[in-house]
Amino acid sequence: MIKKKVNLKSINKFIIVAAISVAVTIFLANHAADLLFGKNSFEVYTSLNKKEKHLRSEIKRLQQDNARLQKEYFELKNLEPEEWNLYLY
Protein backbone atom coordinates (compact mmCIF):
# COMPACT_ATOMS: atom_id res chain seq x y z
CA MET A 1 0.00 0.00 0.00
CA ILE A 2 2.76 2.46 0.84
CA LYS A 3 4.49 1.78 -2.47
CA LYS A 4 1.31 2.58 -4.39
CA LYS A 5 0.91 5.93 -2.57
CA VAL A 6 4.50 6.85 -3.36
CA ASN A 7 4.03 5.86 -6.96
CA LEU A 8 0.78 7.83 -7.21
CA LYS A 9 2.42 10.90 -5.65
CA SER A 10 5.43 10.71 -7.94
CA ILE A 11 3.20 10.11 -10.96
CA ASN A 12 1.02 13.08 -9.99
CA LYS A 13 4.10 15.28 -9.55
CA PHE A 14 5.43 14.16 -12.91
CA ILE A 15 2.11 14.90 -14.60
CA ILE A 16 1.98 18.38 -13.05
CA VAL A 17 5.59 19.17 -14.00
CA ALA A 18 5.04 17.82 -17.52
CA ALA A 19 1.84 19.85 -17.96
CA ILE A 20 3.53 23.04 -16.75
CA SER A 21 6.52 22.38 -19.03
CA VAL A 22 4.27 21.85 -22.03
CA ALA A 23 2.29 25.02 -21.24
CA VAL A 24 5.46 27.11 -20.88
CA THR A 25 6.89 25.66 -24.10
CA ILE A 26 3.71 26.44 -26.02
CA PHE A 27 3.63 29.97 -24.61
CA LEU A 28 7.26 30.66 -25.52
CA ALA A 29 6.87 29.15 -29.00
CA ASN A 30 3.79 31.29 -29.62
CA HIS A 31 5.61 34.40 -28.40
CA ALA A 32 8.63 33.68 -30.63
CA ALA A 33 6.35 33.09 -33.63
CA ASP A 34 4.60 36.42 -32.99
CA LEU A 35 7.93 38.22 -32.86
CA LEU A 36 9.20 36.66 -36.08
CA PHE A 37 6.05 36.38 -38.16
CA GLY A 38 3.50 38.56 -36.40
CA LYS A 39 1.50 41.41 -37.85
CA ASN A 40 3.72 44.10 -36.39
CA SER A 41 6.90 42.57 -37.79
CA PHE A 42 5.37 42.36 -41.27
CA GLU A 43 4.20 45.98 -41.08
CA VAL A 44 7.67 47.14 -40.06
CA TYR A 45 9.20 45.13 -42.91
CA THR A 46 6.88 46.58 -45.55
CA SER A 47 7.32 50.08 -44.13
CA LEU A 48 11.11 49.77 -44.35
CA ASN A 49 10.88 48.45 -47.93
CA LYS A 50 8.75 51.44 -48.95
CA LYS A 51 11.16 53.81 -47.22
CA GLU A 52 14.15 52.22 -48.97
CA LYS A 53 12.48 52.55 -52.41
CA HIS A 54 11.62 56.18 -51.68
CA LEU A 55 15.16 56.97 -50.54
CA ARG A 56 16.69 55.28 -53.60
CA SER A 57 14.48 57.33 -55.94
CA GLU A 58 15.29 60.47 -53.93
CA ILE A 59 19.03 59.74 -54.30
CA LYS A 60 18.64 59.37 -58.08
CA ARG A 61 16.67 62.60 -58.31
CA LEU A 62 19.23 64.49 -56.22
CA GLN A 63 22.13 63.12 -58.30
CA GLN A 64 20.42 64.26 -61.51
CA ASP A 65 19.67 67.64 -59.96
CA ASN A 66 23.28 67.91 -58.81
CA ALA A 67 24.58 67.10 -62.30
CA ARG A 68 22.27 69.71 -63.82
CA LEU A 69 23.37 72.34 -61.33
CA GLN A 70 27.05 71.53 -61.85
CA LYS A 71 26.57 71.87 -65.60
CA GLU A 72 24.88 75.21 -65.10
CA TYR A 73 27.66 76.33 -62.75
CA PHE A 74 30.39 75.40 -65.22
CA GLU A 75 28.52 77.13 -68.04
CA LEU A 76 28.39 80.26 -65.91
CA LYS A 77 32.14 79.94 -65.27
CA ASN A 78 32.64 79.66 -69.07
CA LEU A 79 34.34 76.29 -68.99
CA GLU A 80 34.58 74.20 -72.11
CA PRO A 81 32.14 71.25 -72.41
CA GLU A 82 35.03 68.73 -72.34
CA GLU A 83 35.99 69.96 -68.91
CA TRP A 84 32.48 69.31 -67.53
CA ASN A 85 33.05 65.59 -67.52
CA LEU A 86 35.90 66.02 -65.07
CA TYR A 87 33.53 67.41 -62.47
CA LEU A 88 30.35 65.48 -63.17
CA TYR A 89 29.69 62.13 -61.51
Image: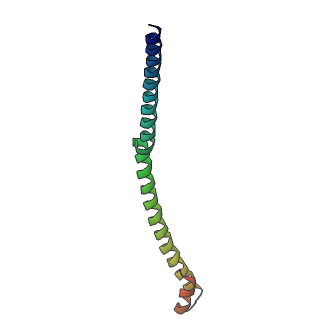
Query: Which residue is more in the foreground, 87 or 78?
Result: 87
The residue under the point 40% across, 44% down is 37
Q: Report how many numbered discs are placed on residues in the image.
A: 0
The residue under the point 47% across, 62% down is 55
Q: Quadrant of residue 15?
A: top left
Q: Quadrant of residue 36?
A: top left
Query: Which residue is more in the foreground, 80 or 7?
Result: 7
Q: Tell me if residue 36 comes above or below residue 54 in the rendering.
A: above
The residue under the point 43% across, 14% down is 8
Q: Tell me if residue 4 comes above or below residue 30 in the rendering.
A: above
The residue under the point 45% across, 48% down is 44
Q: Tell me if residue 54 comes above or below residue 2 in the rendering.
A: below
**Residue sitting farthest toward the right:** 77
Query: Which residue is more in the foreground, 51 or 12?
Result: 12
Q: Quadrant of residue 54?
A: bottom left
Q: Position of residue 23 (x, y in %)?
A: 43, 28
**Residue sitting farthest toward the top:** 1
Q: Position of residue 85 (x, y in %)?
A: 53, 87
Query: Which residue is more in the foreground, 34 or 83?
Result: 34
Color theme of the render:
rainbow
Q: With 18 as the anchor, is 78 left or right in this view?
A: right
Q: Position of residue 17 (x, y in %)?
A: 47, 23
Q: Tell me if residue 23 comes above or below residue 7 in the rendering.
A: below
Q: Position of residue 48 (x, y in %)?
A: 45, 54
Figure quadrant of the N terminus: top left
